[in-house]
Amino acid sequence: MSEDLSEACGIFGAISTTKRDIFHQMYWGLLSLNHRGQQSYGFLTLQNRHFNKREDLNLIPTDPREVQKLASSLRGRMGISNARYATSGGTGSRHLQGGKQPLVVSSSGRKIALSYNGNIVNAHKLRTTLRKKLGRFKTDADTEVLAKQILLSLEQNSGDYKRAIAEVFDLVEGAYSAMLLDLQDESFYAFRDVRGIRPYCFGRKNDLYAFASETPALDINGITDYDYVSPGELVRVDSKGRISRAQIRKSRPAMCAFEFAYFSRPDSILNESRKPVYKIREEFARALSRTYKKKMKAIDLILSMPETADDSAYGLHEETGIPWERAVRKNRYVTRRAFISGKKERDDVIDKKVNIVSRLVRGKRLAVIEDSIVRGDTSKANIAKLNSAGAKSVDLFVTFPRITNPCLYGVDMATYDELIGARMEPEQIAKWIGADSVNFQTIEGLVESIGIKQDRLCLACVTGKYPSRMAQEMADRIRNQYSSELKSAACEKRVYERDF
């Protein structure tokens, strides 16, 4: 019950090695990634040394007439696309309009289009430097920072992409799974930050190359043999469909552990794990059952707060034999997203989003499975409903460890002030949300379930140990200023948007 947490973006790009238009594949690929970003969408194709671009706010359209209009205006056999949620810049309409991706920038006769997923930690500092060399910025989004840094690095390295991206890796800190089209050489480029924090996969079938945030975007296009853009790697597909790969930089990988718990689709296969996310979520619950074995003996019924906790609830049911009731249902047509609403509106939306079949929980000792707790508002509202429905007891089991530190890499929980886990111990959280107990996953249980070594995962939101230097310095500095007694305006500002 992650309070509709949001991440930066979903990205999809496609190249046809024949002359067929690519929009159909792009549309279905991006639509399968709409869970990663719902504030805006954008499609861009390259045709006869010209960029065709269509974009708008809100969800990707599904009305056949609108889709046909997009298709007719987006001809070309090479394209990139983006479904965005803003984790940098403002969230008002003007800011969201300016932050739509893909973003087109140009300088010194070179024009590129960029789509990326992640967050630039040192965007504020880079923006100041780039403004002096390339002039004013049109947006407050970090996409423009990354795009302009690529342009400048290309200019300083005579258009050599390997050297330019090597420079980008050295200068730009953060998470970025990126794809771009270069109008000058009519080529597609994909690259991923040196730690591989956000997922990035690609594959080929017949005349189609496709690159995406998650594997279902490949599946839907008939591609079932996956590969992954490695951390620090640059992949190029030229206008003739020839592919080349270059390992530009090497560093210790730090894949975001939260992708496995919440963001990624259950049917995704993320990098080193080589098993579907839903199987990992089942393992999360099995680990919880072993950690809290005594408490499980006092449970009558398992409930999941839909929808990302369903797989974990099934795993707990299988492991313990305790019945699992799907008596909590989400109204999919209540579309206002609780995480980005004002408090009064958010509380009202939370109340209307979930319905509970009261007669199934009355008098029962409940184990409620959640994927994570961030603010706690959603948990509080739903547990109040369960208590009102006559539950005998409500014990919360959370598949992700207690989040005590902000994310600087693209998950929109970038202040200490909004994190209930930074202010309260589990017993205090339980009291505040109205549960009998709150039981968090252990780090050991999480790591074992994912199947990737801890030193190859990013667990900064849990441990406070960030995989990159500047992020660590920023977080430490803000942490030292923050206390539960003094919640200043500075603490409410995203860490990476502060002027250090």
Image: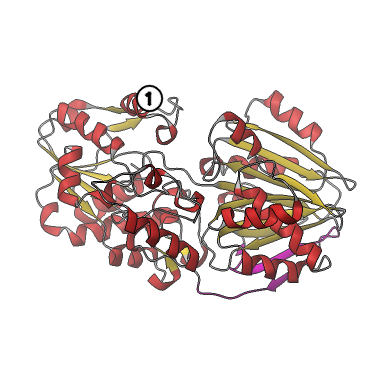
Quarter in which the N terminus is drawn: top left
| Magenta stretch: includes residue 27 | no
Name the residue located 38 percent from the left edge and 40 percent from the top edge. Answer: 307
Q: Residue 179 lies in what quarter of the image?
A: bottom right
Mark 1 surroundings within 10 Å by alpha-carbon count, few (fewer than 14), some (14 through 19), many (20 or more): some
Q: Position of residue 23 (x, y in %)?
A: 74, 41
Tag 1's secondary structure? helix
Instruction: State whether residue 17 appears in this view.
Output: yes
Segment colored magenta: 226-252
Name the residue located 41 percent from the left edge and 36 percent from the top edge. Answer: 339
Instruction: State whether residue 211 appears in this view.
Output: no
Q: Position of residue 65 (x, y in %)?
A: 71, 23
Q: Is residue 427 left or right of residue 228?
A: left
Name the residue located 58 percent from the left edge and 54 percent from the top edge. Answer: 123
Instruction: Give the labeled residue for mark 1.
Output: 345
Name the residue located 26 percent from the left edge and 31 percent from the top edge. Answer: 381
Q: Position of residue 376 (x, y in %)?
A: 28, 40
